[in-house]
Amino acid sequence: MIIRRCSGIALRDKDGKVLLQHRTSDAPSDPNCWTFFGGTIEGGETPEEAARREAKEELGIELKNLKFFKKYRFSLKNKISELVIFTAPLTISIEQLRKQQKEGQGLGLFSLEELKKLKIADHIMAILKDLFNR
């Protein structure tokens, strides 16, 4: 049984780097870790609608050219979580996004090599490796 359903957004710049959020120390999941922007799929929402809503709420942006990437299922703390990942091109400067960011303690653009130096939950790193290998 799936307990929690979420959408995640992998925004990529022209060099292929991915935008991630640095979560706060009091975040309900993955505190102080780097992860995707996104969140829980609310009742009646499709995963795509949730991704678009979360992008607006967390980054103040309307997503264009949003594409389904893959659906993942994880068992975390004896609960099943489903995470639907979408990709889209990053069309706004990182400086502008920093001004508009409404969640987390920071954001950044990272290559796969740079990701290996960050604190990232194992299940998120598995998705990131998948993303960079496609």
Image: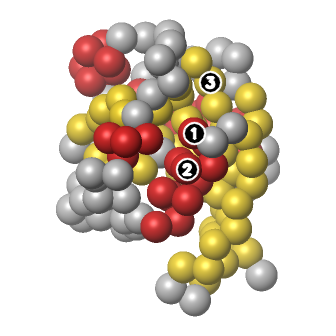
Q: Residue at x 24, y 38 (%)?
A: 106
Image coords of residue 12 (percent x, y):
52, 25
- Tell me the kind of residue under disc 3: Ala
Q: Residue at x 50, y 58 (%)?
A: 124
Q: Residue at x 53, y 48 (%)?
A: 128
**Looking at the image, what colour scheme do you see?**
secondary structure
- The secondary element bearing badge 3 is classed as strand
* CA gap, disc 2 and disc 3: 17 Å
Residue under label 3, please give it: 88
* CA gap, disc 1 and disc 2: 5 Å
Give the residue furthest to the bottom: 78
Contact, CB < 8 Å: mark 3 with mark 1?
Answer: no
Q: Residues within 10 Å of mark 3 (few under 14, many from 20)?
A: some
Tell whether 125 sits left or right of 117.
Answer: right
Residue nearer the viewer, 40 or 120:
120
Q: Nearer the viewer, mark 2 or mark 3?
A: 2
- The secondary element bearing badge 1 is classed as helix
Q: Residues within 10 Å of mark 1 (few under 14, many from 20)?
A: few
First along the sequence among labels 3 and 1 = 3
* CA gap, disc 3 and disc 1: 14 Å
Contact, CB < 8 Å: mark 1 with mark 2?
Answer: yes
Residue under label 2, please give it: 129
* Residue 28 sits in quarter: bottom left
- Above-or-below relation of 30 to 17: below
- The secondary element bearing badge 2 is classed as helix
First along the sequence among labels 2 and 3 = 3
Image coords of residue 75 (percent x, y):
62, 80
Q: Residue at x 42, y 50 (%)?
A: 35
Residue under label 1, please give it: 132
- Tell me the kind of residue under disc 1: Phe
Tell whether 30 sits left or right of 47.
Answer: left
